[in-house]
Amino acid sequence: MTITKLAWRDLVPDTDSYQEIFAQPHLIDENDPLFSDTQPRLQFALEQLLHTRASSSFMLAKAPEESEYLNLIANAARTLQSDAGQLVGGHYEVSGHSIRLRHAVSADDNFATLTQVVAADWVEAEQLFGCLRQFNGDITLQPGLVHQANGGILIISLRTLLAQPLLWMRLKNIVNRERFDWVAFDESRPLPVSVPSMPLKLKVILVGERESLADFQEMEPELSEQAIYSEFEDTLQIVDAESVTQWCRWVTFTARHNHLPAPGADAWPVLIREAARYTGEQETLPLSPQWILRQCKEVASCVMATPSPASS
């Protein structure tokens, strides 16, 4: 049996040939195709969901149920929205114990919103559906996340809905019926007044890891089969200079989007070695925003911090 001793350079990516790439600023604007380049399957699924003739109003996305991932998906969805900023919703006029609903004429109306993408990793019933409050005989109606997402997209973690199945049943009912009905959270304490139902149309992205998706598919086999499905790509294969550039741009975007300094030219080789150690493969680098942010935060004040002209 022959044992070959490998030099440490044989176990890490070749960074010497990419020095020119490391010296670039990797500037990214809002129209940059970075997300579609690194997450093509997820991008395609979002395009399907946002299509006017989408096959389903629900999308299942396999990804960690953390705010960093939900926000990435939300930002990608926002770039694809063709009707962003459109006024939708209504206004509830309360007069004593009489309540009526009219169409929204202004963004200041109490249940009006401008078409948008709303993301939440954990919510309770009142946060999601709003509530009716009564104090000293005065009645007020409070909108929830579904009202904020009216006309747009709601992104929510599956663990929230699996832990609170009644929330899921009501949310599914709202999406399917395209209507919001006011109901009491506690059946033993009915609403003190009758509140008109409100037209409400939204699409929902359910984000969960493998276990959450399996539990949801067992609970909702038919919906799971019909829903649009995609996954967040965890890693990027480094095959040439273009893929190295792509990874550097992804890291830069993640850092700057979270108000952290981007890596300096001398920091990239160190970061890539750490990335290969993390994945355990020489030519595979992570796309995990959590891992990237952890590295950026740890060294923001030293090698990865790019000095500003004023401080140099």
Image (spheres, helix red, strand yellow):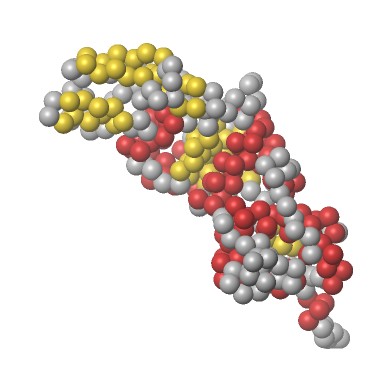
Query: Of residues 117 and 235, which is closer to you in this image?
Result: 117
Q: Quadrant of residue 198?
A: top left
Q: Which residue lies furthest to the left in this view?
A: 136
Q: Which residue is drawn at 63% across and 26% down?
A: 82
Q: Which residue is drawn at 26% across and 16% down?
A: 99
Residue 140 horizontal side relative to residue 129, left or right = left
- Residue 221 in view: no
Q: Residue at x 56, y 50 (%)?
A: 69
Q: Residue at x 60, y 66 (%)?
A: 296
Q: Quadrant of residue 111?
A: top left
Query: Of residues 137 and 191, which is closer to you in this image?
Result: 137
Residue 165 vertical placement versus 178 (above, below): below
Q: Pick the quarter of the image with the C terminus.
A: bottom right
Q: Pick the quarter of the image with the N terminus.
A: bottom right
Q: Which residue lies furthest to the front in this view?
A: 310
Residue 1 horizontal side relative to residue 304, left or right = right
Residue 74 vertical placement versus 133 (above, below): below
- Residue 108 in view: yes
Query: Of residues 153 and 63, which is closer to you in this image?
Result: 153
Residue 40 horizontal side relative to residue 114, left or right = right
Percent x, y of residue 258: 56, 55
Percent x, y of residue 225: 58, 33
Report the number of numbered marks: 0
Percent x, y of residue 72: 59, 47
